[in-house]
Image (spheres, rainbow, N blue to C red):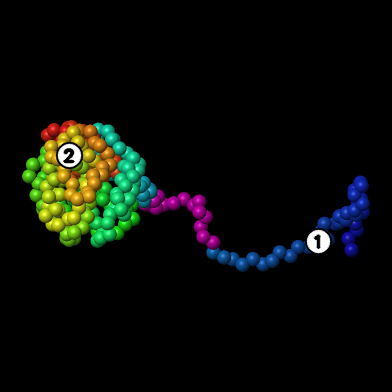
Amino acid sequence: MANVVPVTPPDSGILARFPRNPAAFHFHPRKRTTATLPPPAHQPKSPALRSRRHATLASRLAAAAAPAAAMVSAEAGIDRVLWTEAEVAARVGEVAAALAADLRALPPGPPAVVVGVATGALLFLADLVRRVDVPLAVDFVRVESYGGGTESSGKPRITADLKVDVAGKHVVVVEDIVDTGNTLSFLIAHLEKKGASSISVCTFLDKPARRKFNIQLVGDGKFYSGFECPDYFVVGYGLDYAELYRNLPFIGVLKPEMYKKDSSN
């Protein structure tokens, strides 16, 4: 046994034992097995690998920026925003609540038919009917009077008629905008000939400053509108100029230099 020196620290009461000869202790390390380890992560990369990684990163950044760039491009030509996306959504909810309440109050009968006027009313109709919690049939009619210009030709015509039978049913015509009232009056007369028992109109924008025709509703029909629009040429949320700008989520005023004729639609 190795010689030891008793050491008693002050006030500890503990005997500490330290070997005088450290060589008396022998260590026997375990045998190690040899394994093939992966190269360190920090080892230099080849120029070709660095180039490929830089190209991948650049493509990912470009893909992330594409939606923003597309929206900036889509908004080209907009002078100012009249109603933001949030304001549009809030107002659509209010109009839908009023429409749903009136449809629930109708006398018992077949479900009402919502008729969207393609293509401008597409977005408004989709958002509207999803907030109306009563049985509905939905269809579209295509009426042309503008073509690719900014002024109505004054001679609307049906280019794609309904598939749903509206005879004896309450019909809600959904429009993107009502201005002169010519196209809408023509469509109401068309639906009345098909036997609709009553006809309401639900338009996202109403432009009374341009009204030339007195709109005659049928039966217990009512007139609903989202916003009263000033006499500007407006686009967005389904409204277009030459089939562009429909996908904008807001309503904006188009710059006069973007079209050739007067600033009204």
Residue 179's mark? 2
Residue at the spot x=57%, y=65% of the render? 35
x, y percent for residue 255: 21, 33
Quadrant location of the N terminus in the rendered image: bottom right
Tell me the element at label 2. Answer: loop
Magenta-drawn segment = 37-53
Q: Is residue 198 above or below residue 27?
A: above
For this orientation, the residue located farthest to the front is: 107
Magenta residue check for 120: no
**Front residue (pair 163, 237):** 163
Q: Name which of mark 2 and mark 1 comes first in the sequence.
A: 1
Q: In this view, does 173 lie to the left or right of 91?
A: left
x, y percent for residue 105: 30, 53
Q: Which amino acid does label 2 sit on?
A: Asp
Q: Can residue 121 be seen in this view?
A: no
Residue at the spot x=14%, y=53% of the render? 192
Q: Which amino acid does label 1 sit on?
A: Phe
**Front residue (pair 67, 260):** 260
For discs 2 and 1, the disc positioned in front in the rendered view: 2
Tell me the element at label 1. Answer: loop
Magenta residue check for 43: yes
Binning the other alpha carbons within 10 Å of mark 2 as few (below 14), some (14 to 19) or many (20 upward) gives many
Residue at the spot x=81%, y=59% of the render? 23
**Front residue (pair 234, 58):** 234
Give the CA separation, mark 2 to mark 1.
103 Å
Q: Can residue 170 be seen in this view?
A: yes
x, y percent for residue 41: 50, 54
Which residue, given by chain and number where applicable, does mark 1 sit on?
Answer: 25
Q: In this view, does 156 lie above or below 265?
A: below
The picture quadrant where one finds residue 243 is top left
x, y percent for residue 162: 16, 57
The picture quadrant where one finds residue 228 is top left
